[in-house]
Amino acid sequence: MLAVAHGSRDIGGVVFQVARRAEALARITVDCERCAWDVEGSEAVTLRLTLDDHYLQHLPIVRSGRAEYTVMLGSVERGEHHLRYFRDRELTAPQLRDVVLSIVQKIDVEQVPEGTPEHTPLAFAPFVHARPNTIGRFTDVPVFMWYEIEPTPRGTRYRYSVVFTNEDGGTPTDRLMATWGRTTDIEYVYSVEVDASGTVLADDLQGPEHEILAFGGRREGRHPLLWVTTDNNMVEDRGTTTVRYAPAPIAFPLVDVSREAVMDANPWLYAAAAKELVREGKIVENAPPGNGAIPDPRRFVYVEACGNVGEAAVAVEVGVGDTWIPSDRGVPQYKIVRNGCFRAATPVSPSIGPTDLRGLRVVAYPRPTSEAEGTGKASVRVDRVNRMFMLDEHYVPRASVLEWRGPAVVETGKPLVIMVR
């Protein structure tokens, strides 16, 4: 249902009709030129949404200009429903508290009826409550959710992951770029296994210390209620905050790609992450490794590869002219020590662009111990290199300049060399 949003200074809303029980989504188009996620005091207008006078969620407008946000409204019964939005003055940036809510251009309400294939994964998507020390601080906001579908012997498992704009705790920013190729925080938060009738067989969440715990909390309809409780955005099934978020999940199968492929498909996530770093003072020109800051993310070369690292470690080196620039930047803990598809990113000179990239080397190392370099021989298997790219001026990934299909075994001292054609 398409509805024009009627916004005054402080309140607006739409009315929609439901023919039969469904899960509902709202696509909210907003145009906020003054919203500036990178400027302290002008970060975002924060909307509070209600359905039939019951609180639903908060929606921070983290993008400047015209943008669409898709959020869950939850389960709706047959009949007429009223979706309203209010400016939350306390949670809106001080310099934006006079912005009128005509910034909300339109709302398109979509209904996913019970019994359709798309209904089940939407019905079990979690509502995510804010971490207490983020409320009113415009940091570590869960802005995107996706799910993966996995057949099981008993039925189907749905796995939900969330992209947060940043990570205040855990891995420092420079190490994040070297070993993950991003500064957003991407976390698996919840999974549920259901049988053919939709009955829950088992469900879990990713708790503190990355421990997988059985879910034992409350639900709203079928939606589990989660609370972010740690500075590296782990969740629990109980908490104290009432502010919550509900980005509508999309299906995104990860086949022979890393989780960061979600960001490539939604490049505004790169911009939001970079702008949060600007505001936090974590982007510093020519920042050396080890101090928690990075140069402009548009100066980095991003590489995605897949393989088996085993008990070894791996780094990539980007070829520019006669120089090979390593992703680990000489720091043992900046090497990659996980299997599957992974990202790495390394900064290059501001004068370097995609056409200056001439090749890639994949280098195997003994696994580091503590903060020291490992010793002895090691080997890794590289199955494929999916992409090597840079970001444009708007933080959008440019076309890849290189890809390669293996496999190949890479041993210590014998890097795999792949040249740009």
Image (spheres, grey):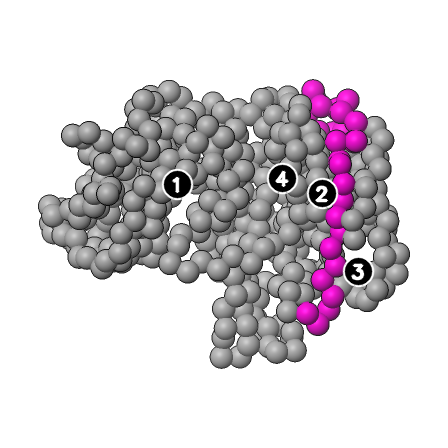
For discs 1 and 3, the disc positioned in front in the rendered view: 1
Instruction: Report the residue at 63% width, 58% height from top.
Output: 125
Q: SS at mark 1?
A: loop
Name the residue type under label 4. Pro
Instruction: Report the residue at 36% width, 42% height from top.
Output: 400
Upstream in sequence: badge 2 or badge 1: 2
Frontmost residue, 198 versus 225? 198
Quadrant, the C terminus = top left
Instruction: Report the residue at 65% width, 75% height from top.
Output: 199
Frontmost residue, 93 versus 347? 347
Mark yes or no: residue 342 visible: yes
User: Could you give the CA–CA distance between mark 3 and mark 2, rounded to whole angstroms?
Assistant: 18 Å
User: Could you give the CA–CA distance between mark 4 and mark 2, rounded to whole angstroms?
Assistant: 26 Å
Proximity of marks 4 and 2: CB atoms separated by less than 8 Å: no
Residue for badge 2:
28
User: Could you give the CA–CA distance between mark 3 and mark 4, rounded to whole angstroms?
Assistant: 29 Å
Name the residue type under label 1. Ala
Point out the stretch of residues depicted in magenta: 89-116
For discs 3 and 2, the disc positioned in front in the rendered view: 2
For discs 4 and 1, the disc positioned in front in the rendered view: 1
Mark yes or no: residue 370 visible: no
For discs 2 and 1, the disc positioned in front in the rendered view: 1
Residue for badge 4:
132
Residue for badge 3:
76
Name the residue type under label 3. Val
Upstream in sequence: badge 4 or badge 1: 4
Circle 4 Cα neighbour tier, 10 Å, few/some/many (<14 / 14–19 / ≥20): some
Residue for badge 1:
399
